[in-house]
Amino acid sequence: MLGARILQLACVLFVFLYGPGPGQAQQIEKRIALVIGNSAERAGPIATAANDAGLIEQALRAAGFDVIGARDLDAGALRSTFREFLDKARSSGPDTIAFVYFAGLGLQLEGENYLVQVNARIVDVSDVPLQAVRLTDITGPLAAIPLKARIVVLDAARANSFALSGRRLVEGLAAIRSAAGTLIAFNATPGTVGVESGAAYGLYAVALSDVIKVSGVSLDALFAQVRERVNESAKGAQLPWNTLFSGPPVMLFQRPAAAAVPGRTGPSRAPAAQPRSERSLRQRAIELEAAQRAAEQIADERAEAAERSAREWAEAAEQAARERAEAAEQAAEQAVQAERRSARERAQAAEHAARERMQAAERAARERARQAAEQAARERGQTAEQTATQRAQQAAEQAARERAETAEQAARQRAQQAAEQAARERAETAEQAARRRVQAAEQAAQQRAQAAEQAARERVQQAEQAARQRAREAAEQRTREAAEQRTREAAEQRARETQQRAREAAEQRAREAEQRAREAAQQRAREAAEQRARDAEQRSREAAQQRAREAEQRARDAAEQRAREAEQRAREAEQRAREAAERQRR
């Protein structure tokens, strides 16, 4: 690619140096231009943008361009203006030169360049595509139109003062490649910004407008002179940048054809040959120097691109390794959390089931105790009534007293208030009924009550045994639950240990993979960049030196030949003048 670019440049120089002279007919191509100056910005106006656009517009009109001028356009107006210019380019024909100049603010985001609308409100990087027009949306459609040449100049690499939330924007504009027949120029090297001139016009616009007016300068030589002038004016703080033009020879300001002077013959123009030869030599020297600088610039750009690509590849590999490590750690953490949640849910479910079983057992025990007490009271009353007439009064009274005392004591011990209250009420009712029925049946009633109380005690004992059995079952259940809890805790501990081991292993593998990837990427990047830089530098140096020597030799030979011819013509003219003078004297 570098050799092809240098060959194309050499062809351009050859055609320029040895092509048709000023006196020959030249084809007049059609020239159109779009000049935009956006100076109104929310953070503060761009001091020279409008003036710069006006200066370039004047220079292009002087060079024969049909110029469309626009100022302070928002995104919609920018797009509509570009569409109008593209329509004009399509209708102009294949012999047209299209020139686009934008003075304003440009930004780069993820390798894309954007032209910012006026009063843009950008608070986050996501606002850039909404508040600006992407450069490729202009250069792409323009490159698709068959034209003789396309020149796109962005005087837009400026410092921006947007207060962004999140990551910051990269300074300046991003380097891009131009299509065949297209030249793209920036006012500053990619990744840098231009300096403020402090005057009414910017450094870049002044240099460009001056060089446009120089006749007979090719595009590459023109922008090489602009680069040199701006760098000198900025004292090295600003270095413009442009792609090389690959297409037919194009000169923005043509050499004017020599006008014939009445009364003079052909030989009378011979003395002007020597000054033109000197100008040609100086111009060829400028062209050769521009070609050498262009070749060196291409080599530097390719080396920087290779190094940047290697860095990006290494960063991508490192980022991928980190993401894989984070994903593994996150997966392990999620597994542990899921296991913990499952264990907690199982424990909560078991605890809830145990509480429900305990509550059900307590409710069942209370219900059975209540039913037993009520049944015992009913049976006691029935038995007392049935046997009251059969037992002796003394036995009934004694049994009733013993039953009442025993019932009160059992009620206090068991804390079964409902059963005790019911037993006492029924005992008192039975006693009152027994006393009312017959005084003599008190002893029998007491005996019946004692028998009933004995039966109640037996039932209560049975209930207590059942309650103890249930308590044992509950204790066994709690023991089982405790065992399950210990099992769950052991499982959680094992899961945590497994997670820790998995995390450590994943981190170790990620670190090793990251280290290997970084070392391999750095090694490959260094080797590739160094090799490409050496090859490009060697090829460019050899080619530039060879072509410089050849061009210098050709220029020297041509100059000597033309000097000899001029001297011969001068002698002949002098001889003819002497002969004419001699004839006049005779």
Image (cartoon, helix red, strand yellow):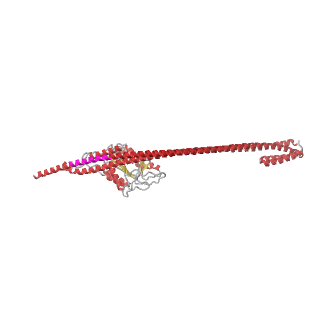
Question: With 45 as the anchor, is 211 left or right in this view?
Answer: left
Write the start and end of the magenta stretch as one range. Answer: 544-565
Q: Nearer the viewer, residue 333 or 201?
A: 333
How many numbered discs, if any? 0
Residue at 48 percent of width and 44 percent of height = 516
Closer to the camera in the image, 318 or 402: 318
Is residue 219 found left or right of 455 in the rendered image? Answer: left
Q: Let me know if residue 513 appears in the view.
A: yes
Q: Is residue 506 left or right of residue 432?
A: left
| Position in image of residue 482 (x %, y %) | 68, 44
- The residue that appears at 24% across and 52% down in the rendered structure is 275
Q: Residue furthest bottom?
A: 198
Whole-percent x, y for residue 351 in the image: 67, 45
Residue 575: give x, y in percent of width and height: 15, 50
Q: Is residue 152 visible?
A: no
Q: Quadrant of the N terminus?
A: top left
Magenta residue check for 444:
no
